Amino acid sequence: MKIVLATSNPNKVREINEMVQGTGIEFILPPEGFDPVEDGETFEDNSLIKARAAWEISHTWTLADDSGLCIDALDGAPGIYSARYAETPQKRIDRVLEEMSGIKNRTAHFECCMTLINPAGGVEKVVQGVCEGSIALKQSGIHGFGYDPIFLLKDSDKTMAELEDDEKNKISHRSKALAGILKYLSTAAKQSI
């Protein structure tokens, strides 16, 4: 089964395809023309906007996720603006480290909301995933992408970027949300979706 993943980020497609190996599901990039305006107020809003935009040009099974880093001391920022917090991934990391300078409460979490749309354009399932942790004092690690080098996992001294891909894929916010989608698809497949 092929499902369009509503993203223009090939890293996300690669990461999610690694997570679903052996399930008979393959995620693919949307057709040309995928360029949604993410103007929702929540991860769920933006996930739905992206799913609908990809469905409009593919008219097949579509999965979208919207995710980001939420830092308690910054009132949840960068949150839904995680990907647009600065011009480049490194500048986004630098901005967070600067804003967190001198702050003792460094708790944070990654949040992911996934929306699955069926070929008829209806919302099939919405699932949330969360990964708890905190903001490191400095970046560390070479794996992953985005804020991974400054996200310390809860009850660990490792950042997300210090984990191998297979380790990350077992505990990440995205893997938790995806597990809910896969569980739904396997149940629905038995009822022949």
Image (tube, rainbow, N blue to C red):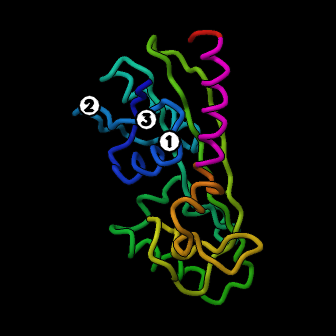
Q: Nearer the viewer, mark 3 or mark 2?
A: 2
The residue to which callout 3 is attached is: 50
Residues packed near mark 3 inside 10 Å, few (<14), some (14 to 19) or many (20 plus): many
Please state the horizontal and vertical placement of residue 91, each as a whole percent of the image. Answer: 39, 75
For image coordinates 50% across by 41% down, the residue present is 21
Indicate which disc residue 1 carries.
none
- 172 horizontally vs 54: left or right: right
Q: Residue furthest right?
A: 155
Please state the horizontal and vertical placement of residue 107, each as a whole percent of the image. Answer: 72, 71
Secondary structure, mark 1, is: loop
For image coordinates 39% across by 69% down, the residue present is 89
**Which residue is nearer to you in this view: 153 or 102?**
153
N-terminal-most mark, 1 or 3: 1
Q: Which residues are magenta?
A: 175-190
Indicate which disc residue 31 carries.
2
Residues packed near mark 1 inside 10 Å, few (<14), some (14 to 19) or many (20 plus): few
Asked whether the beta carbons under mark 3 and mark 2 sit within 8 Å of each other, the answer is no
Secondary structure, mark 2, is: loop
